Amino acid sequence: MTNQYIKSLRIKRGFSQLEIAEKVGISRSSYIAFEQGKRELTLAEASELSKIFEISLEDIQIGKSNTPEVILGKSTKLSKSKISDEVKERISVPQEKVKKFKQVLLYVLSKVGGKPNIGQTVLYKLLYFMDFDYYEKFEEQLIGARYMKNTHGPTPIAFAKIVDELEQEGKLESIKSKFYKYDQTKYLVNPKETINLSELSGTEVAHIDWELERLSDMTAKQISALSHEDTPWLVAKDKEQLDYEYVFYRPERTSVREYEPL
């Protein structure tokens, strides 16, 4: 049914019902009624949805997705059918945890923020790999942040808002600096700030420390290049949100999980 198909696309892309309703130009209650099968779409509404999800009106009518196919090579760890079955047992839609995001960011900066290479670009990629690697390892979300495909790699969508709030709270300060000849934005934790990890488990802290150990000395160019080899970034369109489920199609270079032989 069209309503269930659109609902599945909305959830897959990480949109709330209110966000879609506002984009379509209708009330949230009207959109909810559509998802519940209590009202039909007008032609204008269907047209707006086709733009939002980058699908044709015909695709909406027949319930066909244009999600990019992934070519499975020898390095593929799980079959598509296995992923399809297992996704039902875990939450793949980003469940962004703002409080946890703040604690992770402050912790990361307290550990490596003073390194000359740790500017905004490197920070974006560190957060990306922490999130997506944790999902591949444990099939659970760490921060659950949403990431968008940009030219230089994955960008956490809520980052600017999180930083702004931390600056207003007096916990963080952003400064302009240079790394060799390149301009960069650095973030410094208030030295009086006590790092609170109440939202994180021991396993999560250990995972973050492991990521920092292996990635935090990379330059922006190096870590961006690594992210460009990762399947979630490769299959996404420009400015599109990255899908966590594609970590199970990763090449050997970026995969962090030991899989049972097929």
Image (tube, rainbow, N blue to C red):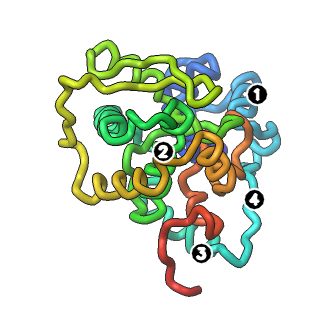
Q: Amino acid at mark 4?
A: Glu
Residue placed under numbered mark 2 in the picture: 126
Splitting the image into 4 quarters, where does residue 148 fall?
top right
Q: Nearer the viewer, mark 1 or mark 4?
A: 4
Q: Residue at x 64, y 32 (%)?
A: 40
- State the SS at label 3: loop
Q: Is residue 68 above or below residue 48?
A: below
* Secondary structure category for the residue under label 2: helix
Secondary-structure class at tag 1: helix
Indicate which label's residue lies in the foreground, 3 or 1. Answer: 3
The mark lying in front, picked from 3 and 4, is 3
Please state which of residues 34 and 157 is positioned toward the viewer in this rendering.
Answer: 157
Say if mark 1 contacts mark 4, CB within 8 Å.
no
Tell me the tag on residue 47.
Answer: 1
- The residue shown at (46%, 47%) is 216
User: Which comes sooner in the sequence, label 2 or label 1?
Assistant: 1
In the rendered structure, the answer to whether residue 140 lies left or right of residue 241 reads left
Give the side of residue 114 with respect to residue 205, left or right.
Answer: right
For the residue marked with disc 3, what is the amino acid? Lys
How far apart are labels 1 and 4 at the CA level? 24 Å
Of the two numbered discs 2 and 3 on the same chain, state the one appearing first in sequence.
Answer: 3
Disc 3 target residue: 77
Q: Quadrant of residue 179?
A: top right
Q: Nearer the viewer, mark 2 or mark 1?
A: 2
